[in-house]
Each structure stands twice: as structure tokens, then as C-alpha cells.
Amino acid sequence: SVPLLQAARKKNSLNLLELNEAELEEQFVRGDGPGGQATNKTNNCVVLKHIPSGIVVKCHQTRSVEKNRKIAREILQEKVDLFYKGEDSDVFKEKKASEKLKQEKKRRAKENLERKKLFKEMQQLDKE
């Protein structure tokens, strides 16, 4: 089973719960990580909290405060949707589907590797 809040940030989720701006608490803080002076002197990292659920999202993906605000709201909307809907959420279903595809791809790659190995062994036997 997938931890619910880790499944967030998947695209193409259409049926998400709407966020009420009155339920959000927004802060602008200094970001961390690489970037040097550009990061250390600007408060362009957005910390967004959904008060009823207690979910907090921190976004510092771009240098633009407006873009970070938008991205933070998208991420928070997906996490809130997961929090309230659980396994019925579109985000959760997408994550499960992508995991299934990934496992199938892994299985096929493993089968192909076995076939190649067998083929090489057959070639070695033919040479002898």
C-alpha cells in the first residue's frame, strides 16, 4: 500500500476538492538548498497550511513568489483531496496505476534479460 500523502503531485487529476482561501494560512520564508545569494536574501519560499486538516506544504521550486504560490496550492489541493477521500481519490488511483505500469515494465525487462542470457548460453554451446 502507498502512503497516502506521498501519492500527491500527480498531474491530470480532474476531480479534486476545492480549497477555500479562508482555510489557508500562507507564509513567505527564505528557501534552503543550493542557490547562494539568490536564495539567502529573498523570501520566495511559500509555506501553505490547510488549517482544518493541518497539512503543510512548502514550495521553493522557482525564484518567482507567484509561481511558487500557484504550485504550492496545486500540491496542497492534491494532498487535501488524498486526506479526505483516501483510496477513492483520483490522485491515489493514478499513483496505483503508474506503479502497476512500472512493475509490468520491470517484469518485462527481467524476462528479456533472461532470454538474452539463454540465447548467449545457446551460442556458446553451438561454438563448442
Image (cartoon, grey):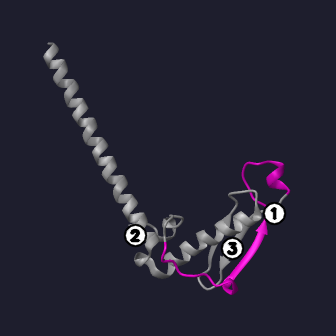
Identity, as a three-letter code, of the amino acid under mark 2: Lys
Q: Which residue is mark 2?
A: 93
Q: Say which mark, if any, is on residue 43.
A: 1
> Residue furthest toward the top?
128
The answer to if 26 sits in the magenta stretch is yes
- The percent coordinates of residue 39 (x first, y second) are 79, 54
- Measured along the vertical axis of the image, is residue 121 above or below residue 90? above
**Magenta extent:** 14-41
Estimate how packed mark 2 is, as few (under 14), some (14 to 19) or many (20 or more) residues with alpha carbons within 10 Å. some
Residue 14: x and y, percent? Answer: 49, 73
Relative to 47, residue 33 above or below: above
* Element carrying mark 3: strand
Distance from Cα at disc 1 to Cα at disc 2: 36 Å
Position of residue 101 relative to residue 74, above or below, is above
**What residue would you read off at disc 3?**
48
- Residue 27's label in the rendered image is none
* Marked residue nearer the N-terminal end (3 or 1): 1
Q: Residues at badges 1 and 2 in contact (C-beta under 8 Å)? A: no
